[in-house]
């Protein structure tokens, strides 16, 4: 009985990683960049559906589209025309939102150098057996990605951040997907092992958006992520699809741009890497045979209490305003001047008085 | 073997909130209220019993929860729904000796926050939209637009500011909101407002912190963790009505969490901790109601009620029928004979009550869908006694003036109000221009507390106790100057403007009907939010609009920078080219060495030609 349990557990830990994390970032602000938020939310939906829990997902949305006042259907973000699929849903947890999505915060999340008071949901608590999926979308160019229309992250910075992660043993394998214009330039500079990268367009090409919705008034999704979502909808947690299928997503006929990928840093053969290694989740279960005894708390008596007066007018009027800054004691300046004058007249005599008055 | 199986079962079951909480309730119902027998076999055997619904049975449990929904039709045709969920727990978070470690109905995330940061009272609210007092009357639970957080710490805390900073970060993780932007530049320490709403006698305002983020957006990602704090989650009871697509498509949406110590029973000999979660929403007649004056639960929430939360000791729906005594204004179906009166906000109101713990409420279809169908036209609304407005006057990007108007609509009674204003440091207030006028005469406040701002460190704080004469408008004006920020301090969208948080007006308004100060009988939750100490007046808090001011913003846009660069390049290029074309060169004699100059001088003297 327990022997069969042991056998399946060794099989379980064969695949090199024991937990999955996802860092999904949308870097664009303003209503007309609705499609970037829809991109990230559709990857978020797929990743949650395939098993990664909210506690292992760091979701960063630079602007709020769902409850934006220009959204004709509040609390929804659609990915398909005619409002077929609401990728925002009812159970979403955004960790970094609005002005918090900055290059600094993104790099801090990746490298783990966050201030001590940062809550757990905002941290990437990965270890050396974690497979991490990193998805970035927004506006980009040759060698950079724009954050919130005011700052950029360069491909060199990103490569260095991944090297820091490798040296701190913060990942086992990393899948990097980017959907921006000239996205392939962002993975050119990677030099750490075990990274596989996909981009929606090559250097010199623009990634195009898919379809506008006339009721909402903006483009709803980008082409690459639209076809990626279609592909992922067919994947279920036990699926055996591998990375080669992912590389075939969105050929030039559908995407207009040429998606690219990079596998030279990856140690395993992409054919043997399952999609669910990154998009799904492995959860470790510990079986224990020990029972825990819980004890109850005892009661404590005390004297009768009462509620506080909400607006005690008399008390407020007689309240002395608190003086925070230190002031010298009263009469200090006067005394100081008297001392100065006394010393002056003592030294030079009273006859100089007529020069003063 | 059985223990292994049970623990595996327990591990699987714990992932589903609704099912797991049924088992402990059965175990405590069977036991004597002590949790000593909460081991595996007890849970497995209790699971086979039928769920008791008997959380309020003869055994007194340390914690209990109640839920209620109040529906009030408004005169403008809109409808106001207010949910309140209260969990009462007889424990002591701040007891120094033992830590609280077993949580049943009270959420563990909040309990740990309370004990770690020694919090005595915590009030946090997230609001989308502005409450229109003149059209809707007074809200049950007031809240300003954006996020508001005020906390009373226990008087044993040594470093209040450090605790405050960590508390805001932890809460930003719990509620998925950017509360980590609360720092010393928007935190104030009011000296007379925001007295504790819970039990206690120590009111040293050093332990109070108040902050507001008017820019904070509220969306489903804030509602999701809020719903997870409820004992039944969003799976049973009144919380099934909370669907975000309908809740956020409204004129006003506010969700709040209030934690405070209260009297455990009417003798008030010991304290219990109360967690109140409130959600107020106003559905608009035209956007949600399609213009027809007919409201139902299905139309408002796209759901109907099918059962009460099994963990709740009371689960009720109240519909305000005060304006409809004979049924001439609107039809309420399904009809109910249970009527309850309560004194709420100084007025005696009548409510039709639907008790969800009774099976008969749900009728044949086993679902409750309240329908209100209007028959006649409603008259004018009674004007609310206290009302406030605020706006910015002036022109240009240098100076301006903030005007706050406070209306006292009582025909013959005057009452004092406490005005709290917290203005960010980049609007430099000129306090010498502060004027308070009522009925065109100057009105001197009986108490003023002003704390000037420090650039980039703390905001302005102005608190005034003003006596409002009856049937009058009081105007408070103060002039300000706008500061120029450093270019790194601008947000990515600086042309949107910068927000100034709402002013808070706290007042004891004289009430029409005697308020109920007796705490012995059962009162609906919505009437017991603010503690009443005297019969002739009730406490009310009114929030004004937040202000949006434009600061002088440099032109961050790309064309400006490109023009500068191009002009420089053109100037340098053209200048060089011009020089090249028009410059002429003349040969100049180099200056002669010293020896030759001396020789020339001697030669001039001699009259001989020079070298």
Image (cartoon, coloured by chain):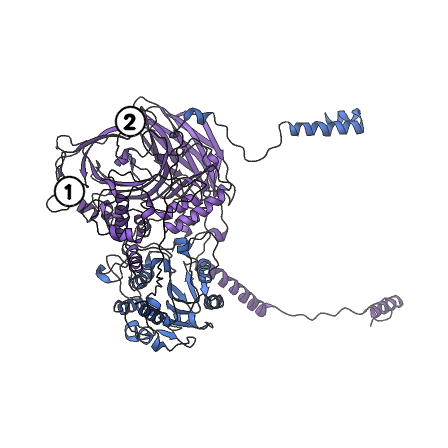
Chain colours: A blue, B purple
**Residue B441 rendering spot, x and y as whole percentages:** 40, 24
| Residue that carries the numbered disc 2 in the rendered image | B516
Q: Is residue A290 above or below residue B25?
A: below
**Residue B462 rendering spot, x and y as whole percentages:** 45, 34
Q: Earlier in the sequence, mark 1 or mark 2?
A: 1
| Quadrant for the C terminus of chain A in the image | top right
The image quadrant that residue A144 belongs to is: bottom left
Q: Residue B359's mark?
A: 1
**Residue A50 rendering spot, x and y as whole percentages:** 29, 64
Looking at this view, name the residue that lies furthest to the top.
Answer: B412
Q: For mark 1, give the secondary structure.
A: helix
From the viewer's side, name the closer residue of B403 and B327.
Answer: B327
The image quadrant that residue B34 belongs to is: top left
Residue A26 visible in rendering: yes
Q: Is residue B547 above or below residue B380?
A: below
| Quadrant for the N terminus of chain A in the image | bottom left
Graded by Cα atoms within 10 Å as few (under 14), some (14 to 19) or many (20 or more), the crowding at tag 1 reads some
Label 2: chain?
A: B
Left or right: residue B455 versus residue A80 is right
- The span from disc 1 to disc 2 (Cα, nearest Å) is 32 Å
Front label number (1 vs 2): 1
Looking at this view, name the residue that lies furthest to the right.
Answer: B606
Left or right: residue B381 versus residue A324 is left
From the viewer's side, name the closer residue of B33 and B256.
Answer: B33
Graded by Cα atoms within 10 Å as few (under 14), some (14 to 19) or many (20 or more), the crowding at tag 2 reads many
Q: Is residue B10 above or below residue A175?
A: above
Looking at this view, name the residue that lies furthest to the front.
Answer: B1
Q: For mark 2, give the secondary structure.
A: loop
Label 1: chain?
A: B
């Amino acid at each position: 009985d327990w022997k069969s349990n042991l056998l399946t557990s060794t099989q379980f830990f064969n695949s090199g990683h024991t937990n999955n994390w996802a860092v999904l970032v949308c870097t664009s602000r303003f209503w007309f960049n609705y499609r970037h938020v829809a991109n990230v939310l559709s990857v978020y939906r797929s990743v949650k559906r395939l098993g990664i829990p909210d506690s292992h997902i760091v979701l960063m949305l630079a602007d709020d589209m769902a409850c934006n006042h220009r959204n004709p259907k509040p609390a929804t973000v659609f990915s398909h025309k005619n409002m077929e699929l609401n990728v925002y849903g009812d159970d979403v947890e955004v960790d970094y939102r609005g002005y918090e999505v900055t290059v600094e915060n993104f790099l801090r999340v990746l490298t783990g150098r966050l201030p001590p008071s940062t809550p757990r949901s905002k941290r990437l608590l990965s270890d050396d057996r974690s497979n991490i999926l990193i998805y970035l979308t927004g506006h980009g160019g040759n060698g950079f990605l724009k954050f919130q229309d005011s700052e950029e992250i360069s491909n060199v910075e990103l490569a260095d951040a991944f090297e820091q992660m490798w040296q701190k043993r913060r990942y086992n394998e990393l899948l990097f997907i980017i959907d921006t214009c000239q996205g392939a330039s962002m993975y050119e500079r990677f030099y750490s092992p075990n990274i596989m990268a996909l981009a929606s367009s090559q250097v010199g090409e623009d990634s195009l958006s898919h379809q506008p919705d006339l009721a909402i008034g903006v483009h709803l999704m980008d082409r690459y992520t639209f076809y990626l979502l279609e592909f992922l909808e067919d994947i279920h947690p036990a699926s055996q699809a591998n990375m080669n299928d992912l590389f075939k997503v969105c050929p030039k006929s559908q995407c207009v741009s040429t998606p690219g990928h990079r596998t030279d840093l990856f140690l395993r053969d992409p054919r043997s890497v399952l999609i669910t290694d990154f998009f799904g989740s492995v959860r470790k279960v510990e079986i224990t045979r020990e029972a825990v005894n819980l004890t109850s708390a005892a009661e404590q008596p005390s004297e009768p209490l009462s509620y506080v007066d909400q607006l005690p007018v008399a008390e407020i009027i007689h309240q002395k305003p608190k003086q925070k800054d230190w002031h010298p004691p009263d009469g200090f300046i006067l005394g100081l001047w008297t001392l100065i004058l006394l010393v002056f007249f003592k030294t030079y005599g009273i006859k100089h008085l007529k020069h003063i008055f | 073997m059985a223990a292994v199986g049970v623990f595996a079962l327990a591990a699987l079951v714990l992932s589903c909130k609704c099912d797991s909480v049924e088992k402990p309730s059965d175990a405590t119902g069977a036991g004597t209220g002590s949790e000593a027998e909460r081991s595996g076999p007890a849970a497995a055997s209790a699971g086979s019993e039928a769920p008791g619904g008997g959380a309020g049975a003869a055994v007194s449990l340390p914690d209990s929860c109640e839920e209620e929904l109040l529906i009030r039709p408004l005169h403008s045709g809109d409808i106001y729904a207010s949910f309140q969920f209260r969990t009462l727990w007889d424990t002591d978070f701040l007891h120094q000796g033992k830590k609280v470690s077993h949580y049943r109905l009270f959420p563990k995330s909040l309990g740990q926050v309370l004990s770690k940061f020694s919090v005595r009272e915590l009030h946090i609210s997230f609001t989308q939209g502005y409450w229109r007092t003149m059209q809707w009357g007074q809200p049950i639970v007031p809240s300003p637009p954006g996020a508001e957080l005020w906390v009373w710490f226990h008087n044993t805390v040594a470093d209040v500011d450090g605790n405050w900073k960590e508390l805001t970060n932890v809460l930003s993780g719990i509620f998925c909101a950017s509360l980590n932007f609360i720092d010393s530049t928007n935190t104030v320490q009011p000296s007379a407002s925001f007295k504790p709403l819970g039990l206690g006698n120590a009111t040293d305002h050093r332990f109070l912190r108040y902050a507001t983020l008017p820019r904070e957006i509220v969306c489903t990602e804030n509602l999701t963790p809020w719903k997870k704090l409820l004992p039944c989650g969003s799976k049973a009871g009144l919380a099934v009505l909370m669907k975000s697509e309908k809740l956020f498509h409204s004129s006003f949406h506010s969700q709040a969490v209030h934690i405070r110590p209260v009297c455990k029973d009417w003798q008030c000999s010991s304290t219990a901790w109360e967690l109140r979660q409130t959600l107020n929403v106003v559905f608009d007649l035209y956007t949600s109601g399609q213009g027809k004056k007919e409201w139902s639960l299905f139309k408002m929430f796209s759901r109907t009620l099918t059962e009460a939360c099994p963990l709740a000791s009371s689960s009720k729906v109240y519909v305000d029928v005060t304006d409809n005594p004979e049924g001439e204004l609107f039809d309420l179906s399904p009809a109910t004979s249970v009527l309850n009166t309560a004194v709420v906000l100084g007025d005696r109101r009548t409510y039709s009550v639907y008790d969800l713990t009774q099976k008969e409420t749900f009728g044949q279809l086993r679902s409750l869908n309240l329908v209100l169908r209007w028959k006649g036209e409603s008259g004018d609304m009674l004007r609310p006694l206290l009302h406030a407005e605020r706006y910015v006057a002036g022109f240009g990007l240098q100076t301006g003036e903030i005007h706050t108007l406070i209306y006292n609509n009582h025909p013959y009674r005057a009452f004092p109000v406490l005005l709290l204003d917290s203005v960010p440091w980049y609007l430099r207030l000129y306090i010498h221009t502060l004027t308070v006028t009522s009925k065109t005469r100057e009105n001197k406040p009986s108490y003023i507390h002003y704390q000037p701002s420090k650039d980039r460190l703390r905001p302005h704080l102005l608190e005034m106790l003003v006596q409002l004469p009856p049937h009058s408008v009081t105007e408070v004006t103060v002039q300000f100057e706008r500061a120029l920020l450093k270019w790194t301090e601008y947000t990515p969208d600086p042309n949107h403007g910068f927000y100034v948080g709402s002013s808070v007006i706290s007042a004891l308004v004289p009430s029409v009907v005697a308020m109920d100060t007796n705490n012995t009988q059962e009162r609906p939750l919505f009437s017991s939010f603010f503690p009443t100490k005297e019969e002739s007046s009730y406490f009310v808090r009114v929030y004004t609009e937040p202000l949006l001011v434009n600061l002088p913003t440099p032109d961050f846009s790309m064309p400006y920078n490109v023009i500068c660069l191009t002009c420089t390049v053109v100037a340098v290029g053209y200048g060089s080219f011009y020089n090249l074309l028009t410059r002429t060169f003349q040969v100049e004699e180099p200056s002669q060495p010293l020896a030759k100059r001396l020789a020339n001088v001697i030669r001039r003297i001699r009259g001989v030609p020079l070298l």
